[in-house]
Amino acid sequence: MVMTHKERYITAIHLGEPDTVPVDATYVDPIHVERITGKKVLAAGGGGGGGGFAVTREEAKMDMNEIMLRNQKLLNEAIKKIGLDALIVSDYWLYPRGFKLKFVDESTYVDQWGKIYRIRRDVKTTYWIDGAIKTPEDLDDFEPPDPESLSYDILDLTKREAGEDYPVIGWCHCGEMFPYLMRGGIEKLTHDIYRNPDFARKLIKKVAETNIEIVKRMLDRGVDVVADSDDVAEGKGPFFPLKVFKEFFFPYTKRLIDECHRRGVPFLRHSDGNLYPILEDLVNLGIDGLHPIEPKVMDLAYVKKRYGDKIFLRGNVDCAYVLPFGSEEDVRRDVRRCVDTAARGGGFILADSNSLHSNVKTENILVMIDEARKYGRYPR
């Protein structure tokens, strides 16, 4: 029996075997959306280092919600056109109604979270450079976005366009990533945790509680899966010792997971890097799924064997080398590697190992999907 996209995805989330392995994308760069739809995306490019957007001088005068609504509609169109199994909405794209970016100079702006970005208009990209919270006094004066004042039009639009055929994945944050971006770097937040822990706790609490309230409103609007995209690790391991996670961060993660479970919504945990030192603790917190199990530093086969009866796995097609630089056969081989390793017994969703960023070849995205459809059929 051929399943709908939603049936296929939800079956895998609940550790079952659907008709074929679901295929998903974490982030589809606007460059691919334009190529797939043939239509112009506003504020094209960007997204690196925590959600920045490369806006033109004219776009900078617009309400960011107008930009995001157009882009979301085109993203939904592109996802459907190439045959992915889920529509995605990110809290990066939620702004207060009437919001305009605050420019420090012609190419530098501060977003609503106090994260500072620089625009490279010549290559249509943005990169994070600093944070606005320099002192405890800055934090006292800082007001995070009011969850009630944000526009959720892009989510309402996506739910309508999903209908009963597609699940909607709500990508969000909790309290781990924005604090170090707002402070200007991981080293500064680390210094705070050890030298000024009350300040660190206050910053993390303000960010996490705001983000949890945003997720509640995403849940109110019917997202089918909540995916926490806070990056907490790099190749050598997590950014902080386990005891720091347990004291400063995990209580908020647990609150977010419990809120999702109270409403019957699965919780997917994302982070790049080597998560082995905290993976058991993340599973014990109650996560339902894990992404991306970064190929260079984690072993998909080990994670499947160790946790495949507890959580679903999502990933792990290499977007660092294979998708940007690989041949068609390289991509097909990597898809088969993922399917062979993690699909048996169900509970696996094929996706990128971070995102479909701007350096990925658009044609390789199509190859990835095609091979997954051909090779990922059940029963295995």
Image: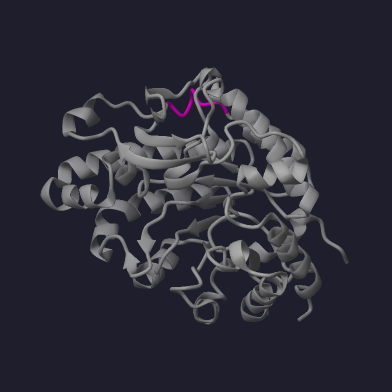
| Identity of the residue drawn at 72% across and 69% down | 328
The secondary structure that dominates the magenta segment is: loop
Residue 87 located left or right of residue 254 = right
Where is residue 140? Give x, y as percent.
22, 27
Q: How is the image coloured?
A: one colour
Q: Which residues are magenta?
A: 146-151
Q: Nearer the viewer, residue 133 or 47?
A: 47
Answer whether residue 25 is magenta in the image: no
Residue 143 located left or right of residue 160 = left
Residue 259 located left or right of residue 170 = left
Q: In the image as oriented, which residue stretches furthest toward the left?
A: 195
Q: Nearer the viewer, residue 348 or 358?
A: 358
**From the viewer's perspective, is residue 4 above or below residue 125?**
below
Q: Nearer the viewer, residue 112 or 371?
A: 371
Where is residue 85? Give x, y as percent.
73, 55
**From the viewer's perspective, is residue 238 above or below residue 33?**
below
Residue 110 visible in the displayed image: no
Q: Nearer the viewer, residue 175 or 14?
A: 175
Where is residue 42? Give x, y as percent.
62, 31
| Identity of the residue drawn at 40% across and 23% down | 102
